[in-house]
Amino acid sequence: MSIQESLRIVERGDVALMEWDLVGEKVNKLSSPIMTRFDELLDQIARSSYKAVILISRKPSIFIAGADINEIQTFKNQEAFVGGASSGQKIINKMEEIPIPFIAAIHGAALGGGCEIALACDYRMATSDNATRIGLPETRLGIIPGFGGCVRLPRIVGLQASLDIILAGKAVDGKKALKMGLIDELVPLENLEEYALRLAQEIKSRGKRKKYFKPKKTLDRFLESMVGRQVVFNQAKKTLMKQTMGHYPAPLKALEVIKSTYGMRNLNRSLDIEAKGFGEVAVTDVSKNLINLFFMMEGVKKQNGVKDPSVQPLPVQRLGVLGAGVMGGGIAYAAADKGIDVRMKDIQLGAIGTGLKAAYVLWDKKVKKRRMTPKQRDRKMALISGGIDFSGFENLDLVVEAVVEDMGIKQKVIGDTAGHCRSNCIIATNTSSLSVTEMSKGHPHPENFVGMHFFNPVDKMPLVEVIRGEKTSDVATATVFEVAKKMGKTPVVVKDGPGFLVNRLLLPYLGEAAFLLGEGMSIESLDRFYKEEFGMPMGPCRLLDEVGIDVAIKVLKIFKKALGNRAEISPLLSQLEGTDRLGKKGGKGFYLYDENGKEKQVDHSIYKELGLAEPKDPLTSRECLERGIFSMINEATLVLVEEQIVSSAEELDLAMIMGTGFPPFRGGLLRYADSVGTEYIVDELEMYSSRYGARFKPCNPLRNMAKTKRTFY
């Protein structure tokens, strides 16, 4: 890579354009060589007679995307992290100290270090284009802004707005950036350079400036006072603890740094505190796990879903959805939202209406939040049509089947659909539990049949399991993999098998919760252990309600038939079968829900209905957690090592994080297993097996790993 070409000065009279365009890279990122080149150019500018300098990117949709994460991973200790942050700070400080005004002309992503460079400029403008996003996402990687973001952003936009961005790792669009004072001008994309040059001419006589936040409203003035700041910091910490349960140290450290430096006049002292805080969180396992997750996500973007990298997916411009309903409407929404034409089919016009309404409601929420205009919503809605016949199916590239979970019905629907489509049209089933190989027998060209399992609700859940049947072709797999990515989802390819991957691992965990309730544990304690202590997004009882108790029982029965003693069903769940306790969708399960599906409280009457005494919580949180989590690890070892349902530990962990919300700070199920140790896990499973039965018996691959002290990574 030519460093000189990647970062260069182009003269426009007495104004310098500093052009960022990393050779051979899709994005501009801050590495040591680039920062050294930046430093050299700043020295050159300091010796020049330029009257203004404009920082501008020549990438189509990136300003500067932040620091090179690969380089961050090379730092081995806290001193190295502090040193890296300090050296970056010094270079950016130099830009601030040069007596020539700097303008950041932002189009596209200005994130992390890119945002921090912009913050040190005297003036900032950004395009109104949707690609423009400005923010500090560092806490999402388990670190904090280390190039001055914690110090400069609060000074420019005020305490509340800066905490909102930094603690949550947010990025804002140009319109919001202008409103909060993060930028000075919002301009059309096509006029960015023109407007930047015009601003340069205007400010030549004014020179540099230091912009500080000046609250206008009475409440804002109070919150910026010494007393008000304390209120803001206390409330922010309280909110963080509620959201993270203390499992994520980076947001708390960022808050501590901002609290220590806000209002401090000595900039260098403030930056030293920030660099030290950066080093303290960068060495944590949480940061390492979140960065590993980042690389797993980036890896998916470069993959095609099959072993042969030369396989090309078929282009998909028109997609069909069989079975409109809420799930079908969610799939239609996800496709149309990314510009794909969608044709829905159902046996009833009322269902088509339900599907259309489901999509409309999701876009209308964006309109109400001002993230979309009514015209944009209506244009997207126009991409979805529907009917009760196969009109238009002869032109489809891909059809996703989302009808009732019944093998006979699905096979018939798939066969009928194939007869109305082109021979190379790919048909995918959204089944959550039925065999894709068996289902493909209904298709005249089984090589064009594949599983595409979305998780509910489709608009919120990021995972798509791409399931290969025995005869599924590489092209069909790659096509569905690519479409999932286009929809904004994270696809993971898995082999056909009972429950595929995520449900296969999740159901033993959910099933064990019922056994624990039968042994005297309370719903509140179980859910608290898993949510607050372990970090799951919700406890197992609450999740059973979300999935649907009837659905969970149905799938557990399928697992029992396929897996034998490893999938025991608690007598409690058998008692609930056929009752009106369906979970959230029925308004009553382990919890009670209002007419809008909002959780109200635990329904304590369930204990009496199940013939249970009032719970006494006789078991420790450790046992409750281990019985659920270690059961998942046991099953995951079989899935990965013996059955090869998934091809790598990384893919399994990515699927569990994206599909179940397994705590990202733990790195995934198998990375967590490595942190605990397979020897300990096997010993505990042996003990639980002797107490509670064969469902805890450690599988042979896990035993072998423990004997040889091997890890999953």
Image (spheres, rainbow, N blue to C red):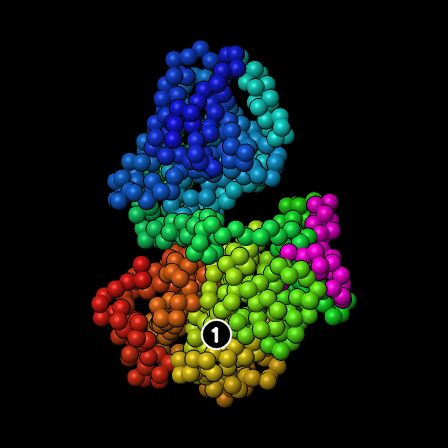
Figure disc tally: 1
Q: Residue at x 74, y 70 (%)?
A: 347
Magenta range: 375-400
Query: Where residue 521 sits: x, y (%)?
Result: 42, 79
Residue 221 appearing in the image = no
Residue reaching furthest to the left: 708
Based on the displayed image, in which of its 4 quarters is residue 647 positioned?
A: bottom left
Residue 674 shows in the view:
yes
- Queried whether the magenta region covers residue 619, the answer comes back as no
Report the amino acid beneath label 1. Answer: Pro
Residue drawn 47% across and 78% down?
559
Badge 1 crowding class, 10 Å Cα cut-off, few under 14, some 14 to 19, many 20 or more, is many
* Image position of 197 (left or right of 353): left
Quadrant for residue 94, please give it: top left
Residue that badge 1 annotates? 498
| Residue in view at x 66 percent, y 66 percent | 418
Q: Is residue 435 left or right of residue 260?
A: right
Instruction: Say which residue appears at 39% left-offset and 67% top-offset.
Output: 644
Q: Nearer the viewer, residue 430 or 527?
A: 430
Quadrant of the image for the C terminus? Answer: bottom left
Tell me where residue 6 appears, x and y as whole percent.
Answer: 43, 27
- Residue 332 image offset from top left, x and y in percent: 66, 58
Q: Position of residue 423 (x, y in %)?
A: 64, 61
Q: Is residue 93 above or below residue 557?
A: above
* Residue 184 position (above or below residue 199): below
Q: Nearer the viewer, residue 603 or 184?
A: 184
The quadrant holding residue 100 is top left
392 inside magenta stretch: yes
Relative vertical location of residue 326 with respect to residue 564 in this rendering, above or below? above
Quadrant into which the N terminus falls? top left
Q: Residue furthest bottom?
A: 611
At mark 1, the secondary structure is: loop
